[in-house]
C-alpha cells in the first residue's frame, strides 16, 4: 500500500516533466519560427540587389556555354568563327562587369538605398537593347538560330553593361548631391548655433557678470566702510562669497562656450612661460601658498589662448581644497617621447573615493565641490589632443598629470611653422 502510494506521485512527476519538456520544445520551435520570420522581415530589397546583379552576369555567361553545347557541339572551329568570336569579345567586358558588379556594389561607396535603382538601370538597359535589336532582327535575314540567340545574348550583355554604368554614375551623382545638402544643413546649423553662443556669451559678460561684480564690490565696500554687527557682517560675507562663486561659474561657462564653439586657431606656445605666469597668478590670488616650479625649457605645444585656463584651474583647485594654513603646490614639466607631461602635486587631504570615478566629468548633481573647473580642464585637454588623469591621491596629497602633444605633432598641422611666442606676448 505504501509503495503504491509512493509510485503514484512519481508517475505524476514524470508526466509533469514530460509535459514541461514538451512545452519547452514547443517554445523553442516558436522562438525559432519567430526568429526566422524576423530575419525574413529584415531581408530588404537592397540586400539582394547586388546578388541579382551578379546573377544576371552569370546567366549571360552560362548562356554562352549553352550556345557552344547546343549549336556548336563544342567544336572549336565553330566557336572561333569570326562572327561568333567578335560578338563574344565585344560582349565579354559587359558580362565580366555584371558578374563582378554585384560584389563591387556591396563594398562600394554607393548608398545601399541606391542598389535597387542600379539594378533597375541594368534591367532597363537589357530591355531596351533587346527590344531594339529584336526590331532589327525582324527586318534582317538570320542565317541560323545560333546566330539569332548569339545576337540577342550580345544585345543583352551590352545593354546590361551600359545600364550598370549609367546606374552607378547616377547613384554617385545623387550621393554627391546629398552630401552637399547635408554639408549645407550642417553649416547653417553651426552658424545658427554660433550666433546663439555669441549672444549667450555676450549676455553673460555684459549682464550677469557685471551685475555679479557690482554685488560683490558693494558688499565688500560695506564691510570696509562700515562696522556692521556680527549678524549683518555674516550676511555681507555670505553675499560676497556667493557673488564671487557666481562670478567664477560665469567665467567657467564662458570658457566652455569658447572652447566648444569657436574654430581652433592654434599657435606654438612655450609651456614653461605659461606655467610660470600661472604660478605667479596663483600667488597673487592666494596668500600663504608655497610653490615649486621645475619645467624644461624646450616644451612647446600647439594651443590657443585658452591653454592658461587649463593650468590655472588645476592650480587654484589644488589650493582651494587644501585645508592647511600654508598649502604647497609642486609643478613639474618634462618631455616624454613626443609629448609634454606636466604634473601638479599638492599636499592636501586627497580626493574622496566617491568622487574619483567622475572627477573630470560635468557634475549635474552638485554633490561635489569641484564645480566646472576640472570638467573645463578635461575639455581643454581634449581640445589640444591631450589627456588629463588623476595620478595619485591620498592623505598626503594629490597629483594630476596633463599630457599634451608637442608642437612637432600638435593638433593643427597647418600651424606648425608658426614661431614660438609666449602666451602673454600680445
Image: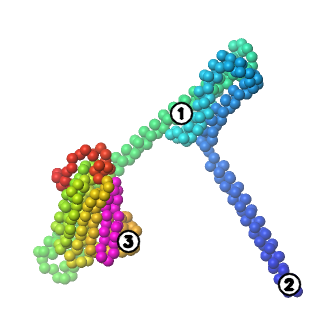
Q: Which residue is mark 3?
A: 355
Which badge, 3 or 1, comes first in the chain's sequence? 1
| Closer to us: 11 or 245 | 11
The residue located at (77%, 71%) in the rendering is 17
**Residue 392 located within the stretch drawn in magenta:** yes
Q: Which mark's residue is nearer the viewer, 2 or 3?
A: 2
Q: Residue at x 26, y 57 (%)?
A: 307
Residue at 76 percent across and 23 percent down: it is: 73
Disc 3 and disc 1: Cα gap in Å?
56 Å
Give the residues in magenta.
380-403
Q: Quadrant of residue 282?
A: bottom left
Residue 232 left/right relative to 26: left
Between marks 1 and 2 in the image, the one whose residue lies nearer the viewer: 2
Q: Is residue 50 above or below residue 223?
A: above
Q: Which residue corresponds to mark 1?
A: 168
Q: CA distance from mark 1 to mark 2?
A: 81 Å
Q: How far across and down, in percent of the image, does residue 355 sit? A: 38, 71
Q: Can you give x and y, in whole percent of width and height, for residue 331 in the image?
A: 24, 65
Helix, strand or loop at mark 3: helix
Residue 333: horizontal and vertical position, in percent? 26, 61
CA gap, disc 2 to disc 3? 67 Å
Q: Of the numbered discs in the image, which one, if any, rests on residue 3? A: 2
Q: How many marks?
A: 3
Out of 104 and 264, give the one closest to the viewer: 104
Task: Kindly state the secondary structure of the residue where label 1 is placed.
Answer: helix
Instruction: Please tell me which residue is depicted at 39% across the width and 67% down the height of the picture.
Output: 358
| In this view, 412 is above or below 377 | above
Q: Secondary structure at mark 2?
A: helix
Amino acid at each position: 500500500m505504501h509503495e503504491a502510494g509512493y509510485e503514484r506521485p512519481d508517475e505524476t512527476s514524470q508526466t509533469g516533466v514530460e509535459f514541461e519538456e514538451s512545452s519547452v520544445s514547443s517554445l523553442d520551435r516558436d522562438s525559432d519560427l519567430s526568429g526566422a520570420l524576423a530575419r525574413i522581415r529584415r531581408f530588404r530589397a537592397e540586400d539582394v540587389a547586388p546578388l541579382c546583379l551578379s546573377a544576371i552576369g552569370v546567366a549571360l555567361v552560362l548562356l554562352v556555354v549553352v550556345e557552344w553545347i547546343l549549336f556548336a557541339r563544342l567544336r572549336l572551329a565553330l566557336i572561333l568563327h569570326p562572327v561568333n568570336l567578335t560578338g563574344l569579345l565585344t560582349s565579354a567586358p559587359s558580362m565580366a562587369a555584371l558578374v563582378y558588379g554585384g560584389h563591387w556594389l556591396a563594398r562600394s561607396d554607393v548608398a545601399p538605398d541606391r542598389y535597387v535603382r542600379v539594378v533597375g538601370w541594368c534591367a532597363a538597359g537589357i530591355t531596351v537593347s533587346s527590344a531594339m535589336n529584336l526590331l532589327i532582327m525582324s527586318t534582317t535575314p538570320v542565317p541560323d538560330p545560333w546566330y539569332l540567340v548569339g545576337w540577342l545574348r550580345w544585345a543583352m550583355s551590352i545593354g546590361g553593361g551600359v545600364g550598370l554604368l549609367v546606374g552607378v554614375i547616377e547613384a554617385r551623382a545623387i550621393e554627391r548631391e546629398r552630401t552637399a545638402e547635408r554639408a549645407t544643413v550642417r553649416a547653417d546649423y553651426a552658424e545658427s548655433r554660433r550666433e546663439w553662443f555669441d549672444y549667450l556669451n555676450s549676455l553673460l559678460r555684459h549682464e550677469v557678470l557685471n551685475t555679479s561684480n557690482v554685488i560683490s564690490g558693494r558688499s565688500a565696500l560695506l564691510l570696509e566702510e562700515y562696522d556692521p554687527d556680527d549678524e549683518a557682517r555674516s550676511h555681507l560675507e555670505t553675499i560676497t562669497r556667493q557673488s564671487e562663486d557666481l562670478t567664477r561659474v560665469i567665467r567657467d561657462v564662458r570658457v566652455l562656450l569658447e572652447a566648444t564653439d569657436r574654430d581652433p586657431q592654434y599657435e606654438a606656445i612655450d609651456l614653461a612661460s605659461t606655467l610660470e605666469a600661472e604660478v605667479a597668478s596663483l600667488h597673487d590670488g592666494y596668500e600663504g601658498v608655497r610653490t615649486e616650479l621645475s619645467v624644461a625649457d624646450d616644451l612647446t605645444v600647439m594651443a590657443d589662448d585658452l591653454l592658461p585656463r587649463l593650468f590655472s584651474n588645476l592650480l587654484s583647485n589644488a589650493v582651494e581644497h587644501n585645508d592647511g594654513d600654508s598649502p604647497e603646490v609642486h609643478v613639474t614639466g618634462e618631455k616624454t617621447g613626443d609629448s609634454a607631461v606636466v604634473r601638479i602635486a599638492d599636499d592636501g587631504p586627497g580626493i574622496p573615493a566617491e568622487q574619483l570615478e567622475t572627477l573630470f566629468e560635468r557634475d549635474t548633481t552638485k554633490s561635489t565641490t569641484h564645480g566646472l573647473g576640472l570638467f573645463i580642464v578635461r575639455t581643454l585637454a581634449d581640445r589640444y589632443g591631450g589627456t588629463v588623469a588623476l595620478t595619485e591621491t591620498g592623505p598626503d596629497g594629490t597629483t594630476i598629470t596633463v599630457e599634451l602633444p608637442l608642437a612637432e605633432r600638435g593638433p593643427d598641422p597647418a600651424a606648425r611653422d608658426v614661431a614660438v611666442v609666449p602666451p602673454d606676448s600680445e
